[in-house]
Image (tube, rainbow, N blue to C red):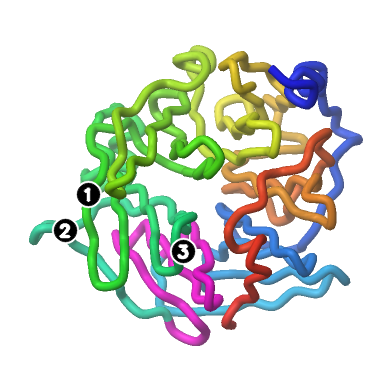
Amino acid sequence: MDGQATALCDFRLEARDFRHVGSGLRRPECVVALSDGSVLASDRAGIVTRIFPDGSQTDHGSGAQLANTFALDDDGTAIVADLKRGAILSFDGGKASLLHDSYEGEPLGAVNFCLAGEAAAGEWYVSVATRHADFRAAIERPRADGRIFRLTPGRIERVADGLFFPNAMQIDPTGGWLYVAETTAGAISRAPLLADDTLGRFERFGPDPLYPGAYTDGLALDSAGNVWVTELSRNAILAIAPDGACHTVFEDPEGTVLRAPTDLAFGGADLRSVFVSSLKMSTLPVFTAPVPGLALRHWRNATRPAF
């Protein structure tokens, strides 16, 4: 373990370490930080809310039944996971348009998370939490029917199956891994990205589960190889070091600072500001990490939204 990862083992947050950005946010399940200092959060009533560095904010989009998560392509188009509709949408301003809502003649299921690939524009990974008509049933009675799809222009292909409510994903381009939070397993899994654009066998990364009763949701990677995770049952943020050791950075069982934290995004000028999204809060809590985050594709390309 290198020095940065070792230092993280001693890192803890207290309530006073959080500040907040945004106001009146409506189910900000997903958060994306941009290199210009603005932050995007998903919006239950539309698609996305953009929060500018001066604190002002604007709401964008229509045509989604429930915009759960989104990510940006190189041209600023947002690819959106519509959880309620069970569809993948494209949004560049105004009303969203449908990309996919079925696979091999059957409904996709509970489309959960969208991730821009690292190789090229137009490459996407999308997690489907469950094929059950009501995703809540798969939370109450966990089942390994979650899937991951890879999208390229005009094509959708299944690259993983048999996962427990796959949720947030991230790609580590330095090690060639795709990480995913398996919510109802309470664990993080990863699979190697193979040369033929398929995924290798998934393996658990870190404790399995992180602790009894855990529900993992969001994850983010930092530049030292640590995996940061949000967990719902304890309103917690955890970090898993490259060697798999896991420790709790913050937990808030009473929900006084964090309530139902769902996603994490590194941002700020030095990529050390960590924005936390949630199911139940109207602002985005923010803390400062001891190491910078891994610069994602949209950050490296200085992508600007098309809306």
Q: Which mark is residue 103?
A: 2
- Picture residue at 56% right of the left edge, 52% below the top: 29
Q: CA distance from mark 3 to mark 2?
A: 20 Å
Tell me the kind of residue under disc 1.
Arg
Tell me the kind of residue under disc 2.
Tyr
- Which of the two discs, 3 and 2, sits closer to the camera? 2
Q: Are marks 2 and 1 in contact (CB under 8 Å)?
A: yes
- Picture residue at 61% right of the left edge, 47% below the top: 278
For residue 287, above or below residue 238: below
Q: Are marks 3 and 1 in contact (CB under 8 Å)?
A: no
- Which of the two discs, 3 and 1, sits closer to the camera? 1
Secondary element at image label 2: strand
Give the residue number, with chain letter if any, for mark 3: 67
Report the magenta residues as a range. 66-95
Secondary element at image label 1: strand
Q: CA distance from mark 2 to mark 1?
A: 9 Å
Residue farthest toward the bottom in the current orientation of the protein: 94
Residue 107 locus on image (x, y percent): 17, 58
